[in-house]
Image (cartoon, rainbow, N blue to C red):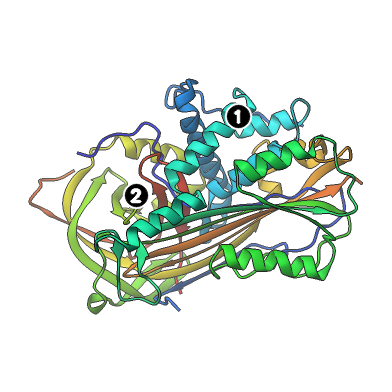
Amino acid sequence: MRRKNLMRLTAAMGMMMACSQVMQAAAPVWGNETVEETTAGSHDDLIEIPTLEDEEYPVDQGKQNYVDTIVQADNRIGSMLMEKLTAENKNVFISSYSIATALTLLSHCSESGGQIEQLKEFLDLNNMSESEILAAQEELAAILGTNKENQEDEEDEASSDSSEEVVSVESDDYSIPKSILETANAMYVDEKMKMSSSFDDLADILSNTYQASLKRCDLSSAETMNEINDWVNEKTHGLIPSILDEPMDPSIRMTLLNAVYFKAAWVNAFEKELTDKQIFHGKEGDTSVDMMHQQDHFEYAENDEYQMIRLPYHGGCEMTVYLPKDSVVADKWSEKDYLYQLGLEADKQEWDSREVSLSMPKFEMKYGKELKDILKELGLEAIFDGCIYDRLTDEEMAAGSIYHKTAIKNDENGTEAAAVTMALMEAMALLPEDDIVEMNMDHPFYFTISNTQTGLKLFEGCVYNLK
């Protein structure tokens, strides 16, 4: 049985934040509506904030456990967002890691006190000093391998090592060193904004701990819009080509960007010759999809409602799939705390190496959502009402919009996924071992992509329908 990890919420892979007064910010590419596109078979006033400090999730405040505190908070934020987003019974795919990172960047823009404390409480950073937060973020980046210099070293080592280090599979540009996990951050400041005398301190934090690029420019220009879209396209390796479809409003004073990119090959790849057409029984009806097949040993668990399987990638990440035994169970995904508790209960299950006959659909998904209203429902209101970001400027600003956009491709070779979060700051105005388990993913399922060492959810999603 696999080792248990208290911190594991079995996981998945998100990004940026926006601030405004009452004025309308520049629209993202999907406007104000949710974008949800899933294709099968192709590869071409304060509300009480939920606390993590309960008996299910004791938080050790020792220095070595600050990373665990961040992981817990990020994963819990993801679960709370999923509750809201799955209520429409539409496909959802987010990266709470990206969203939380963007919010954390914003929290550094104010030294302390005032309404920014609500944001720190939401992120579960309120009991940590800034030096402890920065140290934990650096440690987490080291564990995930998202530090660019470290990643380049690993890639150099992989390219000169044996085939065990480089996974070559029959797909376009899919020879990769175990896995790729990249994060990138950026801050664009409008040239009209009067900078605070403490801005140099903020710049040091963002550039040294988060490797963020900083630029001062005319945010309302078409040139800046194109530059930001180029940044998004580059950092997501083309999975998300753009985030803006028109120049930003002249009221925008600053924008924060976070991007996450993931690409990894399965440890147990699916044979393309076995892929065939099968019916996926979605919420909106049956559709014919490309279904992948394989029979191998995987970590497997089940209870009265779910079959659960962990599908490892090369490089220290895994996809965990929760397949309901009865499709009506999917209706519970929007219930309060349901997905959060599902992850906790899964960690308590007896996971064994089982021989599984697995059928899994190929799919691609694109998703986009403006998160302001949902975050306010979850209790994060102060940053939208106006805060003093004294490390940035003496002007009072408010978060007007938080745009989140994701994409994923899942096929026989592995998974490629990306997320972007953008924040716009505006001026105020178990069975016997010899049995073969059948697991046919031909109906809605919930899945996560997580780092196996920390349990951090990089991405997570619910598939209700395939086209």
Residue 46 lies in quadrant? top right
Residue at 81% from the left image edge and 43% from the top image edge: 398
Residue at 69% from the left image edge and 40% from the top image edge: 204
The answer to whether residue 179 of the structure is visible from this angle is no
Q: Tag count in the figure?
A: 2
Residue at 68% from the left image edge and 63% from the top image edge: 33
Whichever of callouts 1 and 2 sits on the residue coming sooner in the sequence is 1
Q: Is residue 288 above or below residue 321?
A: below
The answer to whether residue 256 of the structure is visible from this angle is yes
Q: Amino acid at mark 1?
A: Leu
Q: CA distance from mark 1 to mark 2?
A: 26 Å
Point out the residue furthest to the left here. 434
Mark 1 lies on residue: 125
Pick the front one: 201 or 77:
201
Judge left or right: residue 215 versus residue 316: right
Q: Secondary structure at mark 2?
A: loop
The x, y position of residue 278, in whole percent, is 31, 75
Residue 282 lies in quadrant? bottom left
Mark 2 lies on residue: 316
Residue at 25% from the left image edge and 45% from the top image edge: 301
